[in-house]
Amino acid sequence: MPAKPSLFKIRLAIKKINEGGVIAYPTEAIYGLGCNPLDEEAVLRLLELKKRSIDKGLILIASSLAQLEPYLQLNNEIISRIQTTWPGPITWIIPAQPWVPHWLTGKHSSLAVRVTSHPAARLLCEENDGPLVSTSANTSDKPPAVKSWQVAKSLDSNELYIMSGEVGNLKQATPIFDVLNQQQFR
């Protein structure tokens, strides 16, 4: 597992998020792009940077299930299914609360979520006191970045704060499962 990042780097990233900025940060397998999920302007800027359609929806990462609960329609069966995989590199698609904005769900009534085990991503969520958007740090037509310099090379680095660090040992992006039927999407 990668080393825990410095609190200075984490706090600088959180400052950028609080200012409405977009950040790039290491996750379990690749670099992620993130921002405050409830800041519509920041999310739209992230989508523009990535050249990603708003219809696809986004993933939220968190440091605990409690950070995700307000966004999700949960029951005991769903909770017991997801808790056995978290914290860890499994993303679940779970029915979203009706208030969750379309810029997060896209054309869906559900939301992709993960309680991350990556030290940097986890600490970002802890210091943010809530979840963050997490989508691969690349334009939609390019492979995901696994190094900070690849993020800077492939995206407009004037538009984001890149937090350097090591990605985890996962060889590809986290698998995504539908919590209701357990179908795997990725």
Image (cartoon, helix red, strand yellow):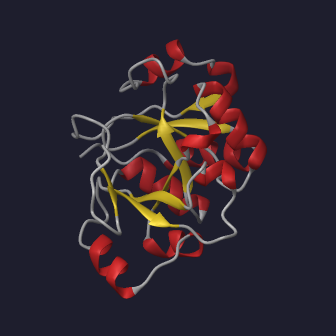
Residue 153, how many percent across, how many down?
51, 12
Q: Residue furthest top?
A: 153
Quadrant location of the C terminus? top left
Residue at position x 49%, y 24% in the image: 138
Image vertical order of residue 125 relative to residue 149, above or below: below
Whether residue 2 can be seen here? yes
Q: Which residue is pictured at 42% across the width and 84% down the height? A: 75
Q: Nearer the viewer, residue 115 or 50?
A: 50
Q: Residue at x 42, y 45 (%)?
A: 5
Q: Nearer the viewer, residue 2 or 153?
A: 153
Question: Does residue 16 appear to the left or right of 69 in the view shown?
Answer: right
Q: Is residue 130 left or right of residue 32?
A: right
- Where residue 38 sits, quadrant-wise, is bottom right
Camera-nearest residue between 129 and 72: 72
Q: Which residue appears at 28% of the width and 48% of the height? A: 175
User: Residue 19, can we see it?
Assistant: no
Pinpoint residue 22: horizontal percent, then vertical percent: 65, 37
Q: Is residue 5 placed above or below 160 in the rendered structure? A: below
Residue 43's quadrant in the figure?
Answer: top right
Find residue 171 and report its horizontal and vertical position in percent: 21, 34
Where residue 33 sits in the image (x, y, percent)? Answer: 53, 37
Count every numbered label the image shows and give the total.
0
- Residue placed furthest toward the bottom: 76
